[in-house]
Image: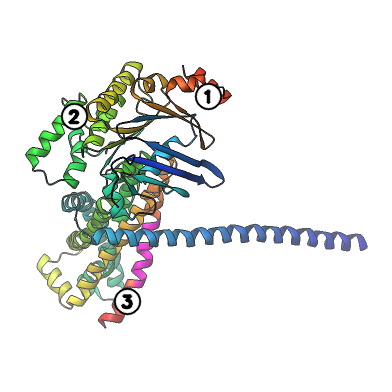
Amino acid sequence: MGEEPNTPPIVIDNLHKKFGDQTVLNGVSLQVQRGETVAVLGRSGTGKSVFLKLIIGLQPSDSGSVTIEGQQITGLDVKHLNEVRKKIGFLFQQAALYDSLTVEENVAFPLSRHTNMSDADRNTRVRELLGSVGMDQDLNKMPSEISGGMQKRVGLARALALDPNILLFDEPTAGLDPITAAEIGKLILELKQKREMTAIVVTHDIRGAKVFSDRMVLIHEGNILAEGPLADLQKSKHPVVIQFLKDSS
Amino acid sequence: MTTYLAILILGTAISGTLANSRLGDQGIVFKSFLIEGVEWFGEWGIFCTRAFRSALAPPYELRELIRQCDVIGAKSLPLVALAGAAIGVVLSLQTHDALIRFGAKSLLPPVIVFTIIKESGPVITGMVVAGRVGAGIGAELGSMKVTEQIDAMEASAVDPYRFLVATRVLACVLMLPLLTLAADFSGLVMGWLANTLADPISFQLFFVSGFKNLLFSDFIPPTLKTAAFGLIIGLVACFQGMRTKGGTEGVGRSATSSVVLSSLFVIVADVVLVRLIQMVWR
């Protein structure tokens, strides 16, 4: 399927997801333009992480469609889905580093499977990636030997390994101290500015989101309740939006 | 008299109702157990199909396969050899007295050789590996599942069925027959040692006498049947690990159920395979 020049890289249309009787997403639609960073906000348990997993096809949706770079991924077989996944980097909430591999091996993992790089080139690339997140001094450490913030940095380096066009972040600053959270936020902003990446960031951290996002989306009871820059959300008269912004600030 | 009769009738009625209600509860429990069992086998079948498909299609994960062969094979070797040795000693001690009682002491070497090679060696290897490797795979994959490492692998466009499942299952299939040889060897050596301490016999005489009537058909099928045990252990443990839910408690449950189910299936498979081997090799 050919990609139109102005097609948004992420198009989500009327996405539904239920777990048993519990409706998690009830017809969510969202388009993310090239180079745009969208922050997805919402209370815990509103299905923000599920939303990200549906975008990358880690979970199947009940109905609706997700189109990545012009390719609809809903119902795609694993082989073709993997081709789409190579264009997406995903930073998990707890970084999800492979605990049997070192920091270096974690970042090298996607490269060794999807590229024909020589060992020397791969090592150089891994060092570059880890250097870009300030982790090039800890190559041989195991994930259990580094802090949560450092794990997130390594996870980010791994997500960037295949040079993706799209990045998905699941709570990148959750569980981190304010200084480390600000550093991670700064890294996301740098990525946005230097690489013009298209990104969706699921977060509770409105202060951080204000820095790196172009647009915010508030999910409530399976639907998008409010959408726009922070200034627009602050003008909203909806009691849930007011309450959320008040409690988060 | 009428009162006694009334009490008797009432008592019978109450006990009958209670019995029916217990039977009803048991029926519901049995039905739910049956449904869960059928569901489990259905999901396992789908899992096995996907695992086989991933294993057969390139690219092959040779480096990971070699690593798993080391983890499953080389690291199980001491335990399997020890278990085989213990079986050899016990078998020698137990059969020595029994054969003397029947005046068949000269049959001791062939009895030990046949018993270990045809049954004890393969089964003890299957059970030891089901315990050690089954728990290991169940816990490792379970832990990877609950910490989203398997999701991360999928998100990196790497098929976890190829990288995690196929390599572990294949390593189990390849390593079990080799481990069985180790169990057989240590069992026979320790069987001779235990025998010779009680009733001295040379190592050469013990082995010549023991192996005199042993055919390849007595040795090859029982040794190779452990490849089927490996297949069962690998597939059950990987399945239990990959469907883990519920944090660390779930990981514990997966490890336990991997051991229990793979041990159980190894025993059942042994019964079926022994009969099959008898039918085919006769």
Q: Which residue range is magenta in the image?
A: B261-272
**Which of the pair A3/A12 is nearer the observer?**
A3
Disc nearer the start of the sequence (1/2): 2
- Same chain for labels 1 and 2? Say yes or no: yes
Q: Which of marks 3 and 2 is in front?
A: 2
> In the figure, is residue A226 to the left or right of A11?
right
Q: What residue type is labelled 2?
A: Leu
Residue at the spot 33% in from the left edge and 59% down from the top edge: B50
- State whether residue A86 is above or below residue B275: above
Instruction: Calculate the distance from the C-alpha at mark 1 to the C-alpha at mark 2.
Output: 38 Å
Residue at the spot 11% in from the left edge and 65% down from the top edge: B203
Instruction: Calculate the distance from the C-alpha at mark 3 to the C-alpha at mark 2.
Output: 57 Å
Q: Is mark 2 on a helix, strand or loop?
A: helix
- State whether residue B56 is above or below residue A153: below
- Residue B256 counted in the magenta span: no
Q: Which mark is residue A130?
A: 2
- The residue beneath circle 3 is B276
**Spot occupied by residue A71 in the image (x, y as percentages of width and height):** 32, 49
Instruction: Calculate the distance from the C-alpha at mark 1 to the C-alpha at mark 3.
Output: 69 Å
Q: What element carries label 3?
A: helix
